[in-house]
Image (cartoon, helix red, strand yellow):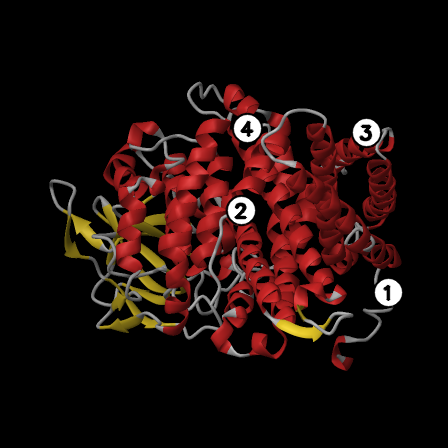
């Protein structure tokens, strides 16, 4: 089993050189927050990730949670780890100060969350879901609900869940059938929800469920869904958990991966109705859930980076320790000396660095959007489906490469390589499948504004390409030419989309996946090109990174340009063909 080493230097580089963390904090009027503090935070969270959470990763994979009498017992060791997480204040990072939070930037929390999900994704899913509940309450809860539930959710004393999916309503939330019957100052909730991550456990004294349900007179479809808080335990007059509510876990899903995370089938109202409280206004539940969707989808994209980073570290370690073959003198050599192994390692390393740059950049745009920057709000909307869709798809390739580096040993469970591959497979599915992200990108984020947000992004990429092309450094000029070529090809495909898909929904769906992947490889290449430019500039002055690190940044960007940017041409060609050949068969012939 591999250890985990937090990528502190690369995280600090992206925060400082790409995000511009100090300027961001100044814009947010966070006078006491700066890069020095950020480095301390990610160093300390790295210790929790490496020393406490990472050793439990394989434990959770092998020893699954169990359910008995409606109560879930989490994997041994998780509760102690969670208490350390709470006691050291990690749950409070981005919460508002009025409710006990530290009000730190979202992008800093993103850097911390990368480490937690790399170390133990099953564990990190629990506080991730709580964050979603916090955001929904902050945005839409009444003052009374906020006072009752936010302090404990933000501190981590209680955890939160999202209860959307039902047996007959997967991604189609219009089919939600759970009921909410008014009764005095509350509602009686009844129905069943599936795929509820950390829907039950014994790590905290209460669990706060956010539940979508319908009122008796609700309109049909998505316009008739309301959002309710349904606590596992009702609160007494002092606001403390008391009598158990009519809610229970009736079974756990047997999954391909993330075994340490209990995925629950939750039943509400088996004994007369679970007591729930309306969040905001009736029949606006779906729009309220979308309040936290950008953050949630970006976090799932971040998980793609996290699991790929863990897989890369394992592959690198194994390649240095596994000896096979000989050198010219007949001496045994480690497999890292084989060119094809180095190719795979570089594919993983460059993919990870591109994803980290994109994840942090998009997270910082959320911070800027919250401060009232309208341009950043538009950029968040454009980048979010790319972060979620492209990064989780790329994670499938990179975690598979880890197995390939291990050879036959990667296919057996004892090395742990298979766990990362299995854990990664859920990522393109939950919080909206890749197909949903692709349709979002091409429809609401491109066609809706006639490509205005996309064109601004293309202008920013063009500006980077011009800086590189005008550099005195030959390798940067080479990189600039490759980025410029990729941008030109993708821009032609984008123009084709704008010209041909606005009135043809079938065509829009046909090309949406290729458009998403094309934009992912382009934005990843753009940000790695910026990294290379910064690295070369830093080498000409005193810096804290060192020549080895900065040389590697340039090398990684060049490899990405040669290995991943050419994929843009393939996706663009498929887009401009309209996929006529692929979809020529009638449905009956498939």
Answer few, some or many: residues within 10 Å of disc 1's Cα (few below 14, many 20 plus, some between 14 and 19).
few
How far apart are the two marked residues, 4 and 3, measured between alpha carbons? 22 Å
The one of 430 and 280 positioned closer to us in this rendering: 430
What x and y, as percent, mark residue 320? 60, 63
How far apart are the two marked residues, 3 and 1, measured between alpha carbons? 39 Å
Establish if 120 lies above or below 105. Answer: below
Q: Earlier in the sequence, mark 4 or mark 2?
A: 2
Residue 496 numbered tag: none
Residue 467 numbered tag: 3
Label 3 secondary element:
helix
- Please give the name of the residue rendered at 71% of the width and 52% of the height, measured from the top-left corner: 516
How far apart are the two marked residues, 1 and 4, measured between alpha carbons? 46 Å
Disc 4 to disc 2: CB gap under 8 Å? no
Residue 7 numbered tag: 2
Residue 21 numbered tag: 4
- Please give the name of the residue rendered at 58% of the width and 24% of the height, measured from the top-left corner: 373
The one of 323 and 494 positioned closer to us in this rendering: 323
Residue 580 numbered tag: 1
Tag nearer the camera, 3 or 2: 2
The one of 129 and 276 positioned closer to us in this rendering: 129
Residue 217 in view (yes/no) = no
Q: Residue furthest front?
A: 329
Label 2 secondary element:
loop
What x and y, as percent, mark residue 102? 36, 31
Q: Earlier in the sequence, mark 2 or mark 1?
A: 2
């Amino acid at each position: 089993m591999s250890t985990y080493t937090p990528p502190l230097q690369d995280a600090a580089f992206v925060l400082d050189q790409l995000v511009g963390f100090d300027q961001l904090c100044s814009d947010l009027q966070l006078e006491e927050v700066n890069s020095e503090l950020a480095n301390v935070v990610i160093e300390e969270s790295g210790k929790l990730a490496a020393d406490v959470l990472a050793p439990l990763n394989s434990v959770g994979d092998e020893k699954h949670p169990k359910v008995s009498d409606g109560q879930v017992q989490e994997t041994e060791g998780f509760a102690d780890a969670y208490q350390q997480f709470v006691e050291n204040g990690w749950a409070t990072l981005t919460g508002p100060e009025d409710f006990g939070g530290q009000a730190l930037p979202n992008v800093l929390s993103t850097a911390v969350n990368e480490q937690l999900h790399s170390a133990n994704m099953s564990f990190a899913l629990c506080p991730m879901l709580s964050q979603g509940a916090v955001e929904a309450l902050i945005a839409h809860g009444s003052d009374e609900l906020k006072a009752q539930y936010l302090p404990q959710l933000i501190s981590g004393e209680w955890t939160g869940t999202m209860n959307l999916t039902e047996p007959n309503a997967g991604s189609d939330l219009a089919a939600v059938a759970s009921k909410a019957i008014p009764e005095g100052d509350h509602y009686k909730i009844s129905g069943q929800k599936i795929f509820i991550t950390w829907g039950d456990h014994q790590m905290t004294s209460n669990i706060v469920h956010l539940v979508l349900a319908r009122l008796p007179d609700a309109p049909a479809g998505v316009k008739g869904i309301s959002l309710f808080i349904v606590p596992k335990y009702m609160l007494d007059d002092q606001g403390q958990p008391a009598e158990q509510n009519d809610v229970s876990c009736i079974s756990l899903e047997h999954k391909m991966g993330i075994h340490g995370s209990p995925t629950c089938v939750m039943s509400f109202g088996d004994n007369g109705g679970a007591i729930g409280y309306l969040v905001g206004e009736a029949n606006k539940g779906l729009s309220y859930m979308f309040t936290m969707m950008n953050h949630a989808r970006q976090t799932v994209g971040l998980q793609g980076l996290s699991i790929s980073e863990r897989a890369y570290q394992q592959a690198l370690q194994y390649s240095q320790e596994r000896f096979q073959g000989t050198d010219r003198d007949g001496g045994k050599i480690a497999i890292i000396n084989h060119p094809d192994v180095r190719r795979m390692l570089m594919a993983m390393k460059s993919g990870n660095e591109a994803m980290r740059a994109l994840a942090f950049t998009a997270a910082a745009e959320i911070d800027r959007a919250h401060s009232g920057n309208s341009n950043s709000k538009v950029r968040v909307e454009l980048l979010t489906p790319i972060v979620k869709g492209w990064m989780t798809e790329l994670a499938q390739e990179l975690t598979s490469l880890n197995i390939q580096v291990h050879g036959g040993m990667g296919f057996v469970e004892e090395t742990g390589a298979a766990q990362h591959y299995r854990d990664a497979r859920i990522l393109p599915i939950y919080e909206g499948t890749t197909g949903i992200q692709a349709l979002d990108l091409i429809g609401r984020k491109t066609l809706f504004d006639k490509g205005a947000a996309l064109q601004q992004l293309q202008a920013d990429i063009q500006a980077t390409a011009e800086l590189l092309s005008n550099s005195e450094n030959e390798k940067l000029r080479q990189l600039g030419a490759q980025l410029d070529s990729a941008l030109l090809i993708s821009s032609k495909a984008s123009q084709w989309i704008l010209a041909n898909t606005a009135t043809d929904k079938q065509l829009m769906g046909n090309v949406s996946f290729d458009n998403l992947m094309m934009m992912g490889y382009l934005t990843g290449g753009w940000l790695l090109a910026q990294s290379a430019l910064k690295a070369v500039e830093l080498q000409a002055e005193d810096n804290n990174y060192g020549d080895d690190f900065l040389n590697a940044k340039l090398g990684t960007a060049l490899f990405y340009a040669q290995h991943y940017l050419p994929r843009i041409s393939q996706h663009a060609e498929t887009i401009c063909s309209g996929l006529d050949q692929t979809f020529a068969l009638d449905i009956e012939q498939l």
